[in-house]
Amino acid sequence: MKIMTQLMTEDGIRCDGRRVDQLRNISIKVGVLKNADGSAYIEFGKNKILAGVFGPRDVHPKHMANQDTGILRCRYHMSPFSVTERKNPAPSRREIEISKVLKEALQPALILKDFPRTVIDVFVEVLQADGGSRCAALDAAAVALADAGIPMRDLVSACAAGKVADRIVLDVNNEEDQEGQADMPVAIMPNVGKVTLMQLDGILTTEEYKTCLQTAIGGCRTVYEIQRKALVEKYFESGDK
Ligand code: ADP
């Protein structure tokens, strides 16, 4: 079958050389922006993403302020050079959707009630995208929120799984996303033990769905260790505790 020969060899090696259960290389650097309250830069395979956080701070416009709770705003933006076809700089439907997805996936980790009448702003700039950018963006944003000193119930760790050449695979890349059979981005609060994001593009059987979800959760747990190490590196090993 065309898809199978293109996306996976008979030995189960994927188009970028990975095994089915293998994540791409991930590196996270905390506190990379001087003017944001918190920030992080992530490389997740070929994805390169910056997240900057401001707040809690006064809400503008003022009428958006809530007397009872703080609010979270997220903006996911792709730079024009982040994809092969120059992306129109105007916000696309996809960027608006992903901004909403990021907000809903991060919000359960924040204790917004403690900061009434304020806003926390999360800005995500995708410098280079290669499939799974919403998950990588979440991973960077969660670390940036922690870097901003915002009280959190837990980190949020995200990773996708999917179905490619009839097999469930961890961490779907761009080619697999475009040509594969399913893509399931997942985010969890690893210590609280809750899923805060689960989307599914494609069709899976019930069994495949369960395997795919468990595979993605396993990936999220690995990502969590990398996020934790990046924070420890900044706050406990660099000397500026
Ligand atoms: P995610 O990046 O979270 O997987 P999608 O599934 O919508 O989100 O996108 C998959 C990939 O498709 C992106 O990571 C990016 O590499 C590519 N892509 C998204 N938008 C565009 C675009 N406007 N032009 C070219 N490629 C794009």
Image: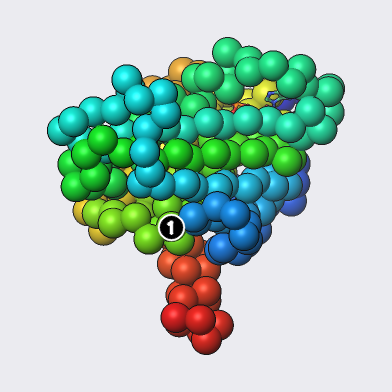
Q: Which quadrant of the structure image shows residue 238?
A: bottom right
**Quadrant of the drawing holding the C terminus:** bottom left
Tell me what residue is drawn at x 18 percent, y 31 percent. 67
Q: Position of residue 129 (x, y in %)?
A: 70, 37
Q: Secondary structure at mark 1?
A: loop
Q: Which quadrant of the structure image shows residue 172?
A: top right
The answer, for residue 221, to whether it is visible in the render is no
Tell me what residue is drawn at x 64 percent, y 39 percent. 125
Q: Position of residue 182 (x, y in %)?
A: 53, 25
**Where's ligand 1: which quadrant?**
top right
Q: Position of residue 212 (x, y in %)?
A: 42, 37
Is residue 88 found left or right of 78 in the rendered image? right
- What amino acid is found at the position of numbered circle 1 in the picture? Ala
Q: Position of residue 134 (x, y in %)?
A: 54, 35
Q: Alpha-carbon neighbours of circle 1 within 10 Å: few (<14), some, or many (≥20)? A: many
Is residue 151 found left or right of 130 in the rendered image? left
Residue at mark 1: 148
**Quadrant of the drawing holding the N terminus:** top right
| Front-lying residue, 134 or 78 | 78
Image vertical order of residue 79 relative to residue 25, above or below: above
